[in-house]
Image (cartoon, grey):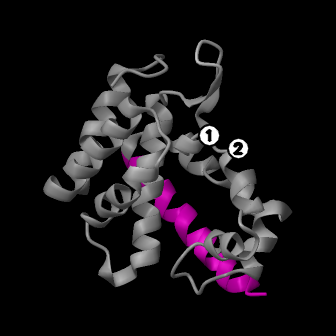
């Protein structure tokens, strides 16, 4: 087990997310971000399959078993993951992606930037979160408007920097106070 390496990665990530959430104005979400990672269901496999802080332990668990129990647990408890936002559509009679509320999209963006910073280290650039997002786009199950919004914000990050993207998010959150999603 790589207990302390995994713990350091999780805490570093949480800290980066908190700092970004604070800038955006969602401090409470920053404080409570990814608390499920400390549950035995997520933390123990994370330590067991720790990848040296270069990639998610969930990837190794997935390679070994065909799925990651830690990820399934995590995405089902954390609304900042677009995978959380799938529900049964009675009209279509199947599971379908649902449009994400703005406040969780803001946390998702903070999470994606923080993860990129942690995993890329000194190689991080503001373009990396967009590149990562676009690589997975062809196989992703996500509401189209949610996907477009994430891509728009990550493009803004890549082209104009973190401060500009955060400013846009803050303005959007202010305009959408009390609304579930309007972007």
Q: Residue at x 37, y 39 (%)?
A: 147
Residue 21 visible from this viewpoint: no
22, above or below 48, in the image: above
125, above or below 180, in the image: below
Mark 1 highlights which residue? 84
Instruction: Judge from the rendering whether residue 121 lies leftward or rightward of residue 74; answer left or right.
Output: left
Instruction: Name the disc covering residue 31, or none.
Output: none
CB atoms at circles 2 and 1 under 8 Å apart?
A: yes
Q: Where are the magenta residues, as a range?
A: 1-23
Q: Nearer the viewer, residue 67 or 132?
A: 67
Instruction: Name the disc covering residue 76, or none.
Output: 2
Q: Nearer the viewer, residue 5 or 51?
A: 51
112, above or below 176, in the image: below
Where is residue 78 shown, x and y percent of the image?
Answer: 64, 44
Instruction: Judge from the rendering whether residue 24 lies leftward or rightward of residue 41; answer left or right.
Output: left
Where is residue 97 shown, x and y percent of the image?
Answer: 53, 32
Instruction: Judge from the rendering whether residue 57 lies leftward or rightward of residue 117; answer left or right.
Output: right
**Outermost top residue:** 91
Prevailing secondary structure class for the magenta stretch in the rendered image: helix
Image quadrant in which the N terminus is located: bottom right
The reply to whether the magenta stretch includes residue 73 is no
Where is residue 46 shown, x and y percent of the image?
Answer: 72, 73
């Amino acid at each position: 087990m790589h207990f302390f390496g995994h713990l350091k990665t999780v805490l570093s990530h949480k800290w980066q997310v908190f700092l970004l959430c604070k800038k955006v104005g969602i401090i409470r979400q920053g404080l409570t971000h990814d608390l499920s990672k400390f549950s035995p269901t997520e933390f123990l496999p994370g330590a067991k399959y720790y990848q040296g802080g270069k990639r998610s332990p969930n990837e190794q668990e997935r390679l070994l078993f065909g799925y990651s129990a830690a990820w399934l647990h995590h995405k089902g408890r954390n609304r900042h993951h677009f995978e959380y936002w799938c529900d049964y559509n009675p009209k279509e009679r199947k599971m379908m992606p649902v449009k994400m509320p703005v406040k969780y999209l803001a946390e998702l963006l903070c999470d994606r930037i923080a993860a990129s910073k942690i995993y890329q280290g000194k190689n991080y650039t503001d373009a990396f979160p967009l590149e990562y997002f676009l690589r997975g786009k062809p196989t992703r199950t996500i509401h189209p408007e949610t996907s477009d919004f994430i891509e728009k914000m990550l493009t803004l990050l890549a082209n104009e920097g973190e401060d500009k993207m955060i400013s846009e998010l803050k303005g959007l959150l202010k305009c959408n106070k009390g609304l579930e999603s309007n972007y």
